Image (cartoon, rainbow, N blue to C red):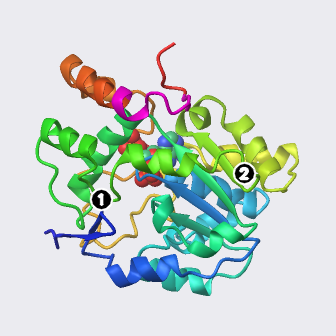
Amino acid sequence: MSHGYFQHEGITFPGLLYSPRGIEAAREFPVYDDDVFNVTYQKSGTVWMLEILSLIHSNGDPQWVQSVPNWDRGPWLETLLGLRRARGCPRPRLLSSHLPVQLFPKAFFGSKAKVIYTVRNPKDVLVSLYHFARIFRPYKDPGTLEQFMERFLQGDVPFGSWFDHVRGWMELRGQENFFCISYEELQQDLRGSVRRLCQFLDRPLGGAAVDAIVANASFAAMSSNRMSNFSLSPRFILDMRRGTFLRKGISGDWKNHLTPEQSARFDHVYRERMGGVGLTFPWDPP
Ligand code: A3P
């Protein structure tokens, strides 16, 4: 079941859950200085970061993440439902978004609100998105991985081009209310990443609280937490008979899916789109 897609300002969105009016309303969303935005290109670790930020928010106490669904803790601004939830959130608010920077709430740019932008190896994003498109009903069937990879490389997928999204958001590097972290860094050193996030958020936490965050934001803990694993999603949104939202939770799964030729084609486009822009990432070749 697909409700088709619409284009808004050159970006593709699914017609189920999203609308041009909703995207525009998100753009006009009033922002407070104490808002914390969890921003990603989809499949880059959004719900993982949301779990970490939720746990920081509650000083490591897992009660909140174990009793409130993640979409209520940090609503996705660009969906109509998410926007309504966001308006009702008590401050300080935690808000999530996949919007490209040019469609982000305008009021953010004159505020002291904070953005945490999580990036992930785009080959792993591709593979994760390919599997996700098969269970997320608002998305069209992805076809073969080969076909889907071409659309991904051209930016012909919901939320547009990974390359444009990352390049756009990374323009904010150096601003004191912008913090960029990678999925790979979270994987390699979750504890150190949590400490850096606490520092950025001015939320100093003790060792026991950090321990609790690391334990409760693990892939295993989130997979068995009904408030975080999307098992509460209605089937017309997420068909978990075909796969789980928390699928593998590893770095480098692309190696199990892309042929050497596909990987080389990806690298070629990556170099064309990201070469010479002065960004370095954990997945860059040595
Ligand atoms: P995979 O499909 O590769 O498993 P998003 O939240 O942006 O949609 O990203 C989803 C991806 O993040 C999925 O990747 C999911 O398994 C992974 N993920 C979510 N929570 C995680 C965790 N605690 N540890 C590692 N990966 C996690």
Q: Residue tagged by mark 2?
A: 175
| Residue that appears at 45% across and 63% down | 99
Give left or right: position of 70 versus 108: left
Q: Which secondary structure is most common in the magenta stretch?
A: loop
Looking at the image, can residue 82 be seen? yes
On the image, the x and y values in percent for residue 215 come to 66, 44
On the image, the x and y values in percent for residue 17 come to 32, 76
Q: Is residue 274 magenta?
A: yes
The magenta span reads 271-281
| Residue 259 position (above or below residue 253) | above
The image's mark for residue 99 is none
Q: Residues within 10 Å of mark 2 (few under 14, many from 20)?
A: few
Looking at the rendered structure, the kind of residue marked 1 is Pro
Q: Is residue 131 magenta?
A: no
Q: CA distance from mark 2 to mark 1?
A: 28 Å
Looking at the rendered structure, the kind of residue marked 2 is Gln
